[in-house]
Structure formats: structure tokens, C-alpha cells
């Protein structure tokens, strides 16, 4: 957020999102025990409203990795 604030000083609001609960790491060697898990392949369809909203606002996003 600080990098974005410096880059865009005129921005009134900066939203920082961290969309990770960390649960996926419980099944990895990170926790000391290797586990085999099956992850089913499945579709993740998006409705028209969601697509419209993403198209409307996505150009203004700044993603810092």
C-alpha cells in the first residue's frame, strides 16, 4: 500500500487485499509431513455481472508482487 501511495499521491483510498487463509499449507511439507491429496478438476464459471465489474474496474488496479 505504501508503494501505491507514493506512486499515486492523489489517490484518496488504497485497498490492500490478502486472500489467503493459509489452509493450503497445512497439507504440505511445510508442516513437517508430506501428504497426498486429490484435487478435483472443476470449472469455476463467472456470471455476467462479475465479468462486467472486473472489466469496469480492472484497468485501475495496481498489483505489486
Image (cartoon, helix red, strand yellow):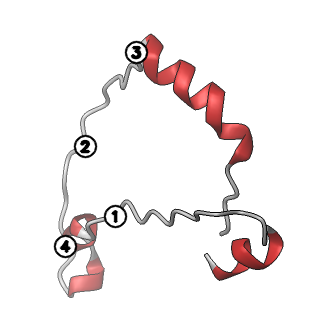
| Residue 43: quadrant of the picture | top left
Q: Position of residue 28 (x, y in %)?
A: 27, 72
Residue under numbered circle 4: 26
**Given contact means CB atoms under 8 Å apart, are the residues at marks 4 and 2 in contact?**
no
> Which tag, 1 or 4, sits closer to the chain's start?
1
C-alpha distance separating marks 4 and 2: 14 Å
Q: Nearer the viewer, mark 1 or mark 4?
A: 1
| Local secondary structure at mark 2 | loop
Sequence-wise, the earlier of marks 4 and 2 is 4
Mark 3, Cα crowd under 10 Å, few <14 / some 14-19 / many 20+, is few
Mark number displayed over residue 47: 3
Q: CA distance from mark 1 to mark 2?
A: 18 Å
User: Separation of disc 2 and disc 3 at Cα?
Assistant: 24 Å
| Mark drawn on residue 39 | 2
Coordinates of residue 25 in the picture (x, y in percent): 27, 72
Q: State the residue in front, 8 or 34.
A: 8
Q: Secondary structure at mark 3?
A: loop
Q: State which quadrant residue 27 falls in.
A: bottom left
Give the residue at mark 1.
Answer: 20
Amino acid at each position: 500500500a505504501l508503494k501505491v501511495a507514493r506512486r499515486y499521491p492523489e489517490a484518496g483510498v488504497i485497498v490492500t487485499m490478502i486472500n489467503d487463509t493459509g489452509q493450503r499449507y497445512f497439507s504440505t511439507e511445510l508442516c513437517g509431513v508430506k501428504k497426498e491429496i486429490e484435487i478435483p478438476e472443476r470449472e469455476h464459471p463467472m456470471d455476467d455481472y462479475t465479468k462486467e465489474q472486473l472489466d469496469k474496474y480492472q484497468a485501475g488496479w495496481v498489483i505489486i508482487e
